[in-house]
Image (cartoon, rainbow, N blue to C red):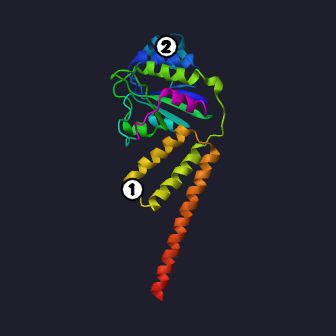
Amino acid sequence: MRLSVALCEPMYEVNVGHIARLVMNFGLDELILIDPKVDLNKARIFAAHAAHIVDNARLVSFDYLKGFDMLIGTTSVPARRRSNIVRDAIQPKVLASIVNLMNGNACILLGRESIGLTNEELKRCNVVVSIDTPTDYKALNISHALAILLYEIYRDNNTISMRDNASKHEIELLKGYAIRLARLAGVREHKIPMLNLAIERIMSRSMATSKEVMLLVTLLRGAINAIEHNRRYDDNHIQGELVN
């Protein structure tokens, strides 16, 4: 498992510096800055011995994150309604169990210091994590939040077991067949994006293996073929009756 950290439009040099230190503390793959609003020379001061992490930070747009096998969104405002799939968040311990089972590359995405991540940005995340606090004030400083997440992920990493996890291509294949089946079943078009996101989140949380996903693909493909075959038979039967 390779783990990176991305900051979305960071505004304060102190946060970039402290997060660079965490990247060095935990030996992460890279620090990614999405459209940063900070003076990186000033951020180096707060990074102390991790100044080279700031110097080597990758400055990118949001689309760069498409290259990760798992994108982990963060929020201090998790879903309060069952229907809010976008902000349906897991706890750090659950995230640790997921990340420690994967053998691809993952990225923890931290939101803006002011407004966090938008719903549209969270929709692009495979999973979303939230850190619960015993008070109504849930918003943590992004560097503090990252420290908690990394501690949970790495404290038990000696129990990591490698699995033949499903690839992004296999999960996309599964989603494609599921959506195709949904349309055949008459699911309304406005519900298709949420269905797509729900399948993505379920697959990411369960860390399904390649074999498991391909078995589901086989099932869905068989169901689609059966439905289409029956419809063709019915159409031909109706046409035959009309001719006779």
- Identify the residue at horizontal 37%, vertical 37% (top origin): 119
Residue at the far front: name it. Answer: 134
In the rendered view of the protein, which quadrant contains the N terminus?
top right
Q: Residues within 10 Å of mark 1 (few under 14, many from 20)?
A: few
Q: Which secondary structure lies at badge 1? A: helix
- Identify the residue at horizontal 47%, vertical 14% (top origin): 44
Q: Is residue 24 left or right of residue 17?
A: right
Q: Give amino acid for label 2.
A: Ala
Q: Position of residue 111 (x, y in %)?
A: 41, 28
Q: Which residue is label 1 attached to?
A: 189
Q: Position of residue 205 (x, y in %)?
A: 52, 38
Q: Which secondary structure lies at badge 2? A: helix
Of residues 26 and 201, the one nearer the viewer is: 201
Q: Give amino acid for label 1.
A: Glu
Q: Which residue is label 2 attached to?
A: 47
- Identify the residue at horizontal 41%, vertical 41% (top origin): 85
Eyeballing the image, is 119 above or below 29? below
Q: Residues within 10 Å of mark 2 (few under 14, many from 20)?
A: many
Q: Position of residue 163 (x, y in %)?
A: 66, 37
- Identify the residue at horizontal 42%, vertical 61% (top origin): 186
Point out the tag, 2 or 1, that comes first from the N-terminus: 2
Eyeballing the image, is 100 above or below 187? above
**Mark 2 and mark 1 residues within 8 Å of each other at the beta carbon:** no
Compute the Cα span from label 2 to label 1: 49 Å
